[in-house]
Every structure is written in structure tokens, then in C-alpha cells.
Amino acid sequence: MVEKLSFKEKVGYGFGDFASSMFWKIFSVYLLFFYTDVFGISAAVVGTMFLITRIWDTGLDPVIGILSDRTSTKWGKFRPYLLFVAVPFGIVGVLTFTTPALSLSGKVIYAYVTYTLMMMVYSAINVPYASLMGVMTSNIKERTTLSTYRFVFAFAGSILVLATAEPLVTALSKTGSGIPGIQQGWQFSMMIYAVIAVVLFYFTFAWTRERISPPKEQKTSLKDDLKNLAQNKPWFILLGAGISTLIFNSLRDGSTIFYFKYYFQNQQAFELPLVRIIINYSTLYLVLGQAANIVGVILAKTVSDKIGKKNTFMYAMVIACVLSAIFFFFKEDNLLLIFGFQFLISICAGIIFPLLWSMYADIADYSEWKTGRRATGLIFSSSSMSQKLGWTLGGALTGWLLALYGFKANVMQTEQAQTGIRMMMSLIPAAGALLSAIFIAFYKLSDSFMITVSDELSQRRNKEADHV
């Protein structure tokens, strides 16, 4: 019997990525800027910290996947993590954006510790959350729909942050002056986002259910799980595509604030009446991008139903590559083109994300069909691992490239630095998008083949149920 998910359960699942994406977007867009222009450490130091801490954290994701696969509670394998890790997730998020009164070396140590803890807690809640989709339903069409809900909410969470972060920080900084006031503004803003995230994770726990279990005869064997994963070619291909896509995305996100602050002479778009809060071009650009991402998410199912997940993914990345390369040639007075291309590129990025996660669920089914073993958490942890590794490389590259091009915080940038920032918004991300398209060209799990796999697995499970 194929489980059809209720609207409430789809919304409940979406709430989880609304919560995660608020933090993810704050980290990918604002954290490097926070560390350089507010916290007070150099871009090169931040880039190296991103690489060191995230490589460790990336290796942690499969461990969390293995642990969650072996978790057994009355709530299931994955949902308990949403309940018990939500509060630590919020607390560490606030600490990450807190600036202590320490020396420069003390600040660097504090940044390493809090950022490492943040990424560990993020893994502890996000890997089980991602894995949950693989056990809520076995219907591949329902999974794509569920993934669509997830990413509509994910980008809605991102829009909330991008639309409110800068105005909120400005408003909450008014009790102080200068850099200390801005530091306080960031800390208080993160407290608000943390409370929202904790509440939403609770709703995800309460409104979702786990329905798919490993085969009854399956015995716990980490060695067998890892062996099967090592022989799963589609997993490696999707891992490479995911990492490349996140490099593309994180470079564009991480460079945006620097692009508008240091390349544009006029950063202010307009002032909100009554509250007298300035809205910058960077805020409008980022919010427009997230709105376009939602358009892409909604288009993903319709397009992939017609031409398949693989072709939809590949064509979206090729188009994003071409548009990103053209973006390099825009100047400050080409505002309409800058915003227009941001909209189109972001639609392409939005299309691939629900496909990526739906394809990981397909790979979990393919692995069970081929080997007779199911390791949903281990396979889905690779999706989180690809996110982290792509984010790691993209974030580290952003910091290092800024240093390479001679970037100095809070001063007028040289022509070399400005050109470098433009390349980080265009040509370099284009290379990541092209690499992603090349990887996905080798992906072999077609939609028609996966329907056959799903039907055969359903027959197996029905036989097991009849023998119980």
C-alpha cells in the first residue's frame, strides 16, 4: 500500500527546513561579513577556519547518519533528534554571533570553538531531518512533492532572514554606538531567529510520521552498510553534483554583501516610511533571489515529470553557468540586468534542490533493491555531507579569494579587489555550475527505472507483512 501524505504532514516537514534554512542562509550570506567587518578578524583567517572546522564536521555527518539508522524509539529513528537537539541548535546559533571582549587571538579561538559546535549541532539535527523524507513514503512522486514543500518552506525561511536581517540588526543596534552596537544588534537578532527555529522543529516532530523500516531480516552491520555504499555509483555521482552545486551557490551568496558594499557607490535602495529603516540593494537582491528559488522549486516537479529529474537538473545547471558568466560584464548602472539575471540564475538554482534530495531517496531505494539492505540515514547523511563540503569549499574560497585580491575590511577597495569580487559573483560560480552539470550527466537512475524499483520493493514489503 502506497502512503499518501496529508497536507498537514507536508507542511510539518516543510517547517523543519524553514528552521534550518534561516540559519543556513545567515551563515552562507552574513557569517564571513560578520567575522570580517563586525567581529574583527581577517578574511584569510576566516577562510582557513571554514576549511578546518567544516572538514571535521563534514566527516561527522556519516557518523550521525549511522547513529540515526541504529536509533530505535517509540517515535522512530529520526524524529527524536528533532525534539532533543532543537534547543541546543538555537543556543549555539546565538553564541556564534556573539562577540566576546577578548584579544584578537582570543576571538579567533572563540570563533573556532563556537563555529565548530554550531556545525556539529547542525549535523545532529539536519541529517536526521533529511533522512526523515526517505521513510515517510515510498511513492517517488510523493517524494518529489514532499521535497517541493520542503524547499518552498526552506526558501521562505531564507526570505524571512534576508528581508529582515539587515533592518533588524540596524534597529537592535540603536541602543549602542559604533561596532559594539552592531555586535549587540547581531546577537539580539539571532536570539529572535533561534526561538522561531526551535518552535518550528517541534512542529516538524509532532506533525510527521515514519512509515518505512529496514527489511525484517536485516541485521545491524556497519561494515556491510559501508561496503554497499562504496559500491553505489549513483551515490558518488550525486555527491559530486551536490558539492559542485553548493560551491556555485555559496560563492554567490557569500560574495553578495561585499559586492554591493564595496563595488557600488550607492548601496541604499530606499527608506521605509514611519520606521525610517534603510533598505539596501543587497537586501533586495538576496530576497529577489530567494523568491526566484521558490519559483524554481515549484517548476521542478512539472518540468521533471516531462523530461525526467536528471535532464531537468543538468539543463538548469548549464543555463545557470552561462548566465553567471555573462553576469561578470555588468556595471553598477546595469541595475535592471543585475537583478534580472539574479532572478533567472536563482530559478535555475531553485529547480535543482528538490530534485537533489528526491534523488537521494531514490538512491536509498536502489540500494535496498540491489543489496537487500536499507541504510537511509547513511545515504542521506551524504546529502548533508555534500552540502557541508560544498559550503566548506565555497566559503573557504570566498575568504581566500578576498585576501588574494587584496580585500581590507571597511575601507575603499582597490580596482583589483573590486574585479575579484565581481569574479566571485560570476565566473567562478559558473565553473561550479558547469562541473555539477558534468557530474549529473553520468547519473543512470531514470524515473522509469525507479518506478520499477519502487514497485518491486513494495511487493517485497507486502510479502514480509503477510509473513508477520
Image: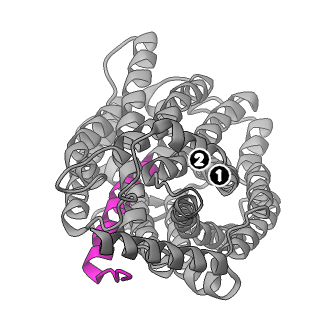
SS at badge 1: loop
Instruction: Write down the quadrant of residue 460 in the picture.
Output: bottom left
Image quadrant holding the N terminus, namely: bottom left
Residue 337, position in %: x, y? Answer: 72, 71
Magenta range is 1-26
Relative placement, left or right, of 417 versus 29 is right
At x 29%, y 45%, the residue is 71
At x 41%, y 51%, the residue is 218
At x 51%, y 64%, the residue is 361
The answer to whether residue 160 is visible is no
Residue 235, position in %: x, y? Answer: 63, 53
Which amino acid, mark 1? Asn
Residue underneath mark 1: 232
The answer to whether residue 195 is visible is yes
Q: Is residue 254 above or below residue 180?
A: below
Residue underneath mark 2: 228
